[in-house]
Image (cartoon, rainbow, N blue to C red):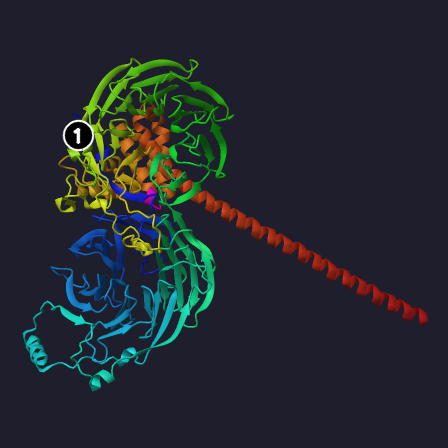
Amino acid sequence: MEAPDNCINSNFSGLLGTVYRRGNLSFTRDGSGLVSPVGNRISLFDLKNNKCETLPLATRHNITCVGLSPDGNFAILIDEEGAALLVSLIGKSVIHQFHFHKPVHSVSFSPDGKKFVITKDNVVLMYHAPGRKREFNAFVLDKTYYGPYDETTCIDWTDDSKCFAVGSKDMSTWVFGAERWANLIYYSLGGHKDAIVACFFEENSLDLYTISRDGALCVWQCDTELDGLKPMPPKGEAKEKKEKDDDEECFEEPRCEEIHGKDNPNEKESKETREKVKYSRVAKHFFNKEGDFNNLTSAAYHKKTHLLVTGFASGIFHLHELPDFNLIHSLSISDQRISSISINCTGDWIAFGCSGLGQLLVWEWQSESYVLKQQGHFNSMVSVAYSPDGQYIVTGGDDGKVKVWSTSSSFCFVTFTEHASGVTAVTFTSSGYVVVSASLDGTVRAFDLHRYRNFRTFTSPRPTQFSCLAVDSSGEIVSAGSQDSFEIFIWSMQSGRLLDVLSGHEGPISSLSFNPVKCVLASASWDKTVKLWDMLDSWRTKETLMLNSDVLVVAFRPDGKELAVASLNGQITFWDHENAVQTGSIEGRHDLQMGRKELDKITAKQSAKGKSFTTLCYSADGQSILAGGLSKFVCIYNVKEQILMKKFEISCNFSLDAMEEYLDRRKMTEFGSMALIDEGAGDEDGVAIPLPGVKRGDMSARHFKPEIRVSCLQFSPTGRSWAATTTEGLLIYSLDSGLMFDPFELDVDVTPSSIRKMLHGKEYTVAIIMAFKLNEKKLIQEVIETIPSNEVDVICSSLPDLYVEKLLEFLASAFEISCHLEFYLIWAHKLLMLHGQKLKTRSEKLLPVLQFLQKSIQRHFDDVSKLCEWNIYNIKYVLAISQQRGVKRLADTSAEEGDMDSDCDYIMQDSHKESFSS
């Protein structure tokens, strides 16, 4: 058996297509990064370098709240069920797991980083912050605060971490002391007629702002400064215990205290009560005096600049200056509710999250411009395709949008909205600058990536819905399959004319694929056949392959010599299409491993019998094949051996349906599943259970769980990564060779010390070969960069053919990170010039490596060419200005000389007049 393909070593590297799902947004400590929850993962947006990274960790359900530590090293992620992860943002790994057993509404670290507070139900819990020292249990409960009568909603701390305020749905705000203060244990503030959305302390003060959902802002003034808080006098027993602890110098785990905010009628008023902290309301403002706005949904306050930002359910946001409540400006960013707002540390950038459309925006309010504006597909993502150089990915969704993403930055840089219905298929042409998409609206459209416009629209003689799409290797022929007329339509890209209509199938066309090498089109249909059409022979049917079940998807191997077909019975069959002979088959039904939906009447094992693969994709070298369907697994099979090599679990998110193999019996009643009860359908709009007579909120809103599935798979032409469109978004898996020791023809004498010894002896070729045998990337880089540039030519000519391929692959990866651009370009140039003919004979095998190298060089070319063009423009501008000034100076000097000449003439005339008179 051959060694397994490299793709089984690929790991999760990024999530595209989803930029925000729900939960609170948080800026990093320096204000240039943004943390956004996307389903059960979090993405880090680097706003200065224009990059996005999704951390390789996940919770069991969708994340609802994120708390960042003040130093920016840790984050606490809490999901819908109350399960928490303590995450290191430096190591990008999970440090600790904890369960709060109830849904948590908000979490916040104290500014000094010593404590953090969470709110659940009507209780507030304070914990010792983890990470300060080595500890067995990272979550140690310090105090429990009682007071609100309904669910708690928001938290804010004073700047010195002495007190914090908590808002509640019972329309009250509670101020608690983080320590036992004599004059402030708790304080309750009213004055609102709706649930509290946010509360904020003023800078270095106990003064407070409270904001409710009906758009009311109350300004509360405190009669005591922060320095006026008096510590609770210690009791005699506490003194003795303290002395004993000092003598023993031992550490004890702090005991949990309970602080009750409910009034006790037995307590009598004392002198201490009269001296306690008091609040008074000095002002009350309203946002919606004119009644133009809906409920207030989120708010954020920057203490240094006194800037208040409020978001509403209608998508409008306001900027106010406090405490005078001066409106700076009011803008609309969406037609959906603004779910979360965050302001960075400098107060310049404001982040908005809209969960309805999956929008994420960062707004610079002073210049009134966008720093970041991203939106994913707000419906399911259906199809995906890589560009030929692997730099871009195009996706199509049920929302009718076609989006193009950059693989290096993970950002969407163009969105095409011309389609009027769901997009069913997308693909790139061979040039890489044209995107073609098919839709259920009856059109196939071609988009130009140079000018970002729809330059061709292909239609059929009578309206039909297109279900699949294929473009030939030259990019001149476009074909699309119909799902209602059972026909295949062929157009010319150059003229836009319909060339032919292929009939012959007796069922909907499910898939199309052009042979990469020959002019042959393969079409799959629900009529249990695959037809091969010869483009050079007037589109006649070359072969018809008969199968035992409906055909769902068809794919050619990259070298065009093999055809893979997936059918409804769960089989993947391989065909030699030249001779119409089946060469192998894989029974993949049991590998799908379906989950059971909440409302399913039968078990997952029984339902899996009717499931099959709906998408296929060959790896770049053609040795493996990826297969996915209505399951949380993507299977990778070895084509030659026809065995399962690895199964990738694309999601562990139980907020999605069909994730569990067995249903929880606790959710089953004598009347059916508890999932049938539509609980919490309108939590966000204030309607928990739609009762008769309730008019507030959207009565038609329903809560449902989307089903997990893989709709499309695509392998990168570089062979380094593959992409899967799933219910969660576009998942990217790539090779991470840095974490793996993978020696090649290793010998006893091959050690790092012996390699460095060869380097010092100037035996460079031997050193390179030994470094590749050890196959440690840093050591190879050290050897390559030690070699003088004038020796490159000699070494490249003496290098064995086997190591030329490995060196090219190393150079391609080095271009991604190294700053020695010219040095590595010399290596690549010499290798290709000296070994070009030999590499050409093995071009099929080396194609992924060469495309990877081309992608790396092309990216640098684009960056450097833009910089050079900008510099040329600046030089021309400076030269033009200098020439203008030179001409102006010349004109000025000539004018001065003319003035001097006229003066001389005048003097001469005067002298002549005087001499004449005399």
Is 38 above or below relative to 662?
Answer: below
**The N terminus lies in quadrant:** top left
Q: In which quarter of the image is residue 632?
A: top left
- What type of secondary structure mainly makes up the magenta span? loop
Residue at x 8%, y 76% (from the top left corner) = 246
Q: Which of 692 and 312 is in front in this view?
A: 692
- The reply to whether the magenta stretch includes residue 831 is no
Q: Which type of secondary structure does the marked residue at label 1 adopt?
A: helix
Q: Where is residue 248 in the image (x, y as percent from the top left)?
A: 5, 74
Q: In which quarter of the image is residue 100?
A: bottom left
- Apparent side of residue 451 relative to residue 811 in the rendered image (left or right): right
Is 877 above or below relative to 141?
Answer: above
Residue at x 63%, y 52% (from the top left corner) = 883
- Apparent side of residue 502 relative to residue 842 in the rendered image (left or right): right
Q: Where is residue 61 in the image (x, y as percent from the top left)?
A: 22, 48
**The C terminus lies in quadrant:** bottom right
For the magenta stretch, what is the residue range? 816-820
* Callout count: 1
Q: Where is residue 106 in the image (x, y as percent from the top left)?
A: 26, 60
Q: Which of 58 and 546 is in front in this view?
A: 546
Q: In which quarter of the image is residue 145?
A: bottom left
Evaluate whether residue 873 shows in this view: yes
- The reply to whether the magenta stretch includes residue 818 is yes
Q: Which of 667 and 579 is in front in this view?
A: 667
- Apparent side of residue 88 relative to residue 578 in the rendered image (left or right): left
Is 323 above or below relative to 92?
Answer: below
User: Amino acid under label 1?
Assistant: His
Is 554 above or below relative to 375?
Answer: above
Q: Name the residue under label 1.
A: 590
